[in-house]
């Protein structure tokens, strides 16, 4: 099956705050555990065929080499029957309590074993994001002190970064051993730092190199001398760096990039940053990342608040879509677009740093599962453009039901056979 991937996602962040004492589980906060069938109905109502979807690790991975597949079986098997292609999001900003946090050096190897078990459990899944937003995860956890280890040091950041990216690389190798035609969609925040004055040019240049570190390591691209010294000075060994240079799987990857209004920053001459709002926009920043990595692109996240008049999100959707078309028309192979997420989110106005219970109206649907204006607009956009973009697209090689029939468990084989019979009838 070949198609442009109009997508949405269901937010599954699960970091800890208050120095590990409190878990922030977005799926619990938004009611997804109770209403997941309704949410999948909404995905189908939109006309979406690919869904960024995963589970908080804290539920599925209760101990070393121990897994609880109860909820996972129900939701992923239902997606399979509906023929919705999940982009399996396996680690989203949090790890189980027994791992601790991203400073734990055992995390990469343990996570690779988890991903092996997941891929064997659901062999029909082809699309994966092993670790979501690696740069943001390391930054918020170990440079800003907001989540998980809550460190605010360069050494803490580099330690988290090398563990997170190594976990992603090892997971890709592990999944390919089970599903050789797996495709990996790196959902990574794309950033830019603007110098406020001539004295800020130097600090801005450093930050504009640092923003690439997670993808440079993941794709085996050698960093510049300044970033190499930064990594070495803050705890990365030569052997660790060489691992990234020699174990990348770039040929199996799509460079998923996330863009929000807060992705661009002002920089002062002392290196302090603040949000600049949109200056360059998605088109310009995406071309910078594409020129660096030369990979197919997918716009994997965007949203904005609907605003006081209820129309700001619709304007943002139309603007982002215009940027996607501009990227495509300039010759960059872009394979998908995502409004993230399906339903409203809780406490994202403070980046999950506190539990306030505030509803952020960012979804295509509200928490009563009623469509927002942007949801109606996105549904129409998909209808209008689906047949117009044959386009530099992803080939999902085996239809879901047939793959399950060939390789799945007895229960999934039965469901697949029933699906095949219904289709033929």
Image (cartoon, grey):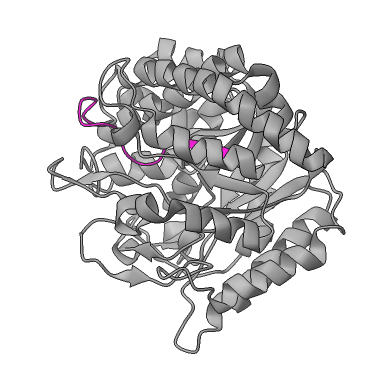
Residue at the (36%, 41%) spot, across then down:
93
**Rendered image quadrant of residue 72:** top left
Compared with 199, 220 (above or below) is above
239 left or right of 298? left
50 left or right of 120? right
Dominant secondary-structure state across the stretch colored magenta = loop
Is 359 magenta? The answer is no
- Residue 63: horizontal and vertical position, in percent? 25, 21
Task: Report the front residue among 65 and 241.
Answer: 65
20 left or right of 13? left
Q: Is residue 294 visible?
A: no
Is 96 magenta? The answer is yes
- Residue 318: horizontal and vertical position, in percent? 68, 72
Residue at the (47%, 23%) spot, across then down:
118
Residue at the (56%, 61%) spot, across then down:
42
Compared with 67, 296 (above or below) is below
Q: Which residues are magenta?
A: 87-101
Residue at the (54%, 67%) spot, across then down:
364
Q: Quadrant of the N terminus?
A: top right
């Amino acid at each position: 099956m070949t198609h442009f991937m109009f997508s949405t996602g269901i937010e599954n962040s699960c970091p800890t705050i208050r120095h590990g004492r409190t878990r922030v589980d977005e799926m619990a906060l938004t009611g997804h555990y109770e209403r997941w069938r309704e949410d999948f109905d909404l995905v189908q109502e939109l006309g979406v065929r690919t869904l960024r979807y995963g589970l908080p690790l804290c539920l599925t991975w209760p101990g070393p080499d121990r897994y609880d597949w109860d909820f996972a079986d129900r939701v992923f098997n239902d997606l399979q029957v509906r023929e919705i292609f999940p982009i399996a999001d396996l680690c989203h900003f949090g790890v189980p309590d027994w791992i601790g946090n991203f400073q734990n050096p055992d995390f990469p190897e343990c996570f690779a074993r988890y991903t092996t078990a997941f891929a064997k459990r659901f062999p029909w899944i082809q699309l994966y994001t092993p670790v979501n937003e690696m740069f943001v995860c390391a930054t918020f956890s170990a440079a800003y002190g907001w989540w998980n280890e809550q460190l605010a040091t360069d050494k803490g950041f580099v330690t988290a970064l090398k563990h997170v990216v190594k976990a992603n690389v090892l997971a890709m190798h592990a999944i390919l051993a089970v599903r050789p035609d797996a495709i990996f969609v790196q959902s990574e925040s794309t950033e830019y730092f603007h110098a406020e004055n001539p004295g800020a040019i130097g600090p801005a240049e450093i930050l504009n190199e640092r923003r690439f570190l997670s993808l440079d390591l993941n794709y085996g691209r050698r960093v510049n001398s300044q970033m190499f010294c930064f990594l070495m000075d803050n705890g990365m060994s030569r052997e660790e760096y060489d691992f990234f240079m020699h174990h990348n799987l770039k040929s199996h990857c799509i460079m998923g990039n996330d863009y929000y209004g807060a992705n661009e920053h002002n920089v002062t001459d002392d290196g302090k940053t603040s949000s600049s709002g949109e200056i360059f926009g998605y088109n310009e920043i995406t071309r910078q990342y594409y020129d660096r990595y030369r990979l197919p692109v997918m716009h994997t996240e965007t949203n904005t608040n609907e605003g006081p008049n209820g129309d700001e999100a619709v304007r943002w959707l139309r603007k982002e879509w215009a940027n996607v078309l501009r990227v495509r028309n300039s010759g960059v192979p872009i394979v998908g677009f995502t409004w993230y997420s399906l339903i409203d989110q809780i406490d994202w106005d403070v980046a999950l740093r506190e539990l306030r219970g505030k509803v952020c109206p960012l979804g295509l649907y509200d928490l009563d599962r009623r469509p927002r204006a942007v949801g109606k607009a996105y549904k129409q956009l998909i209808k209008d453009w689906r047949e117009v973009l044959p386009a530099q697209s992803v080939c999902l090689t085996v239809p879901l039901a047939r793959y399950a029939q060939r390789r799945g468990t007895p229960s999934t084989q039965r469901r697949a056979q029933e699906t095949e019979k219904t289709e033929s009838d």
